[in-house]
Image (cartoon, rainbow, N blue to C red):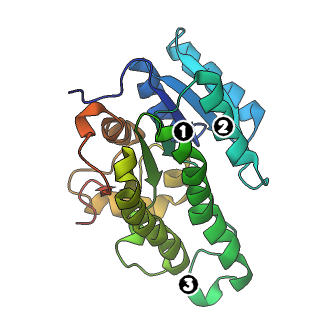
Amino acid sequence: MSGSVRNGDVILITGATGAIGFEIAAQAAAAGAIVGVHGASAESVAKTCERLRQQMPDARLVAAPADFRTTGALEVMVNTVASTQGRLDAVIHCGIAAARGITGPFAGTDPAAFGDHAALVLGSFQRLCFAALPHLSKQGGTIIGFASDAGRFGAARQAVIGGAFGGIMSFVRNLALEVARDGVRVHCLSPSFVSNTPAFAAHAARAEAASARAGLGLPTPADIAPMALFLCSPGAARITGQVISINGGLNA
């Protein structure tokens, strides 16, 4: 049994142009996987692939640009990666987007944005799973979604965000039971604040306060990637339906 992905596994990573997705892509490529590199635009994907090849000239990468807001783009992306590589072994969804007007005190949020936010966060993950399952069920495989501890632990100013992330967690648990007989495993990773990311810098005051409370220290993308890849590995063959917080002891 292995604690990492296998050489030749085909792994599609959405949001690979972001800090967490990039680290997962880098570690997957280093393990010998064929990595589908997703980003919202062809330009961002090309830049990310170039960064990865600077670290690993022999990395096997598949450019997979798609704007999830464009009807059908997500489905075309999944089918293209699977068909060109002849298989799909795992999908790791780091490409979480958020609508405007949903942060801060609930009374100050914009009700017109609620539906858009749910569609971007929960709906896009559900569509991704729907598109990937026919490919994954051919030989077994793994789906990993990302959420946030806002979906597990109550906090002020997080009502709309937490609701959508809680939806991902519930969806993962239910889907995991349904598709287990097809050999497909489904999980959710749930960080809180993650150091060395743009989001950490954008919320510096809150992030620093959280860092002071996290007894183990807040995780970096390099702390998150190994768990994602372990769950896609043979070593996790009997594990499914898990929601795993990676927060350095910030919440328990």
- Classify residue 207 by image quadrant: bottom left
Question: What is the number of callouts on the image?
Answer: 3
Q: Position of residue 167 (x, y in %)?
A: 48, 71
How far apart marks 3 and 2 lie (CA) works out to: 40 Å
Residue visible at 58% across and 30% down? Answer: 36
Mark before the other along the chain sequence, 1 or 3:
3
Helix, strand or loop under label 1 = helix
Please name the residue that numbered disc 2 is placed on: 79
Mark before the other along the chain sequence, 3 or 2:
2
Please name the residue that numbered disc 3 is placed on: 105
Whether pointer 1 and pointer 3 mark residues with C-beta atoms closer than 8 Å, the reply is no
Please name the residue that numbered disc 1 is placed on: 135
Q: Residue furthest right?
A: 70
Q: Position of residue 5 (x, y in %)?
A: 36, 27
Mark before the other along the chain sequence, 1 or 2:
2
How packed mark 3 is, by other alpha carbons closer than 10 Å (few <14, some 14-19, many 20 or more), is few
- Classify residue 177 by image quadrant: bottom left
Q: Which one is nearer the viewer's eye here, 236 or 130?
A: 130
Of discs 3 and 2, which sits in the foreground?
A: 2
Of discs 1 and 3, which sits in the foreground?
A: 1
Vertical position of residue 71 compared to residue 143: above or below: below
Helix, strand or loop under label 2 = helix
Instruction: Identify residue type, mark 3.
Output: Pro
Instruction: Identify residue type, mark 1.
Output: His
